[in-house]
Amino acid sequence: MENIQESKNIISEAKNICLIPSEAPEAATSALALFYTLKEMGKNVNLIDSIPENLKFLTPSLDFISYPKNFVISIPNRLAEISQVYYEKDAEALKVFLTVENGKIKKEDVSFYFSETKPDLVITFGIKDYLKELQGKLNSFGFLLDSPILNIDSSADSTQDTMQENKKFGKINIVKESSLTQTVFEVIKGINANPIKKELAECLLSGVIIHTENFRKNLSAEIFDTSSVLMKTGADLKKIIDNLKI
């Protein structure tokens, strides 16, 4: 409970928050659940990474989710002098044209990244090793570096094959033996006293369905209690199963 209280404190102080789920589907549903919660609390929330196709039914529209929007193309001045920049846009693509006045540019000299306001807080979901797992993305999302991290994960996700333990890289680490969905549900109840809404409940119930493979494995009394609460709140079990196709 101490870490839940710490997470409540750091979230209440933050205005700009970035959410980073791992590639696991349950991490995406967990991030969406907290996204709804933080939006309701009046936070400015960005989600890093897109929502998988089979989970898009959990959002009212693609515009509902906030992603980083300021994309930068950078060319070092020491390599070339750019005298003109213009673009063409049609139904198929956007093309950016650069007129090189002096010097020479190679493809490897051009860097691409997002430039956003540094977040007050980064929250990760199901990520074991922040720098290793995001190695290919941090060049694009460099504005995330040095922000405090709330690391939410499930130690139950480690398998006998990988035995990959969470590196506890966060300023606050909530790593529990329960499923990631259960852990996020506990965090949500700890930071927001408002009644759970249907949209949030369906994100969490989707995480339960994914974690249990439609109630075929990883079952516990806690899982059934949580599912009952979420369905009483309005989560549509049939709709979720039809969309997840599990």
Image (cartoon, helix red, strand yellow):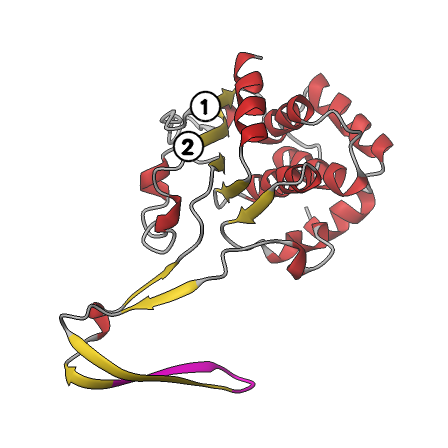
The nearer-to-camera label among 1 and 2 is: 2
Q: Residue at x 63, y 42 (%)?
A: 35
Residue 30 position by quadrant: top right
Q: Main secondary structure of the magenta part?
A: strand
Residue toward you, 240 or 129:
129
In this picture, is 72 found above or below 22? below
Q: Tell me residue 208's x, y (percent).
A: 67, 34
93 magenta-colored: yes
Badge 1 or badge 2: first in the primary sequence: 2
**Mark-to-mark CA distance, 1 and 2:** 8 Å
Q: Tell me residue 122's x, y (percent).
A: 47, 38
Range of residues picked out in magenta: 90-99
The amino acid marked with disc number 2 is Pro
Mark 1–mark 2 CB contact (< 8 Å): yes
Using residue 100 as the reference point, say whether residue 164 is left or right of it: right
Q: Residue at x 40, y 57 (%)?
A: 115
Say which element carries label 2: loop
Q: Tell me residue 3's x, y (percent).
A: 52, 17
In this picture, is 179 found above or below 119? above
The amino acid marked with disc number 1 is Ile
173 magenta-colored: no
Residue 98 position by quadrant: bottom left
Q: Tell me residue 138's x, y (percent).
A: 34, 49
Q: Is residue 210 visible?
A: no
Location of mark 2 (residue): 148
Using residue 225 as the reference point, say whether residue 13 is left or right of it: left
Q: Is residue 30 visible?
A: yes
Q: Residue at x 49, y 56 (%)?
A: 68
Location of mark 1 (residue): 172
Crowding around mark 2 (Cα neighbors within 10 Å: few <14, some 14 to 19, many 20+) is: some
Using residue 146 as the reference point, say whether residue 92 is left or right of it: right
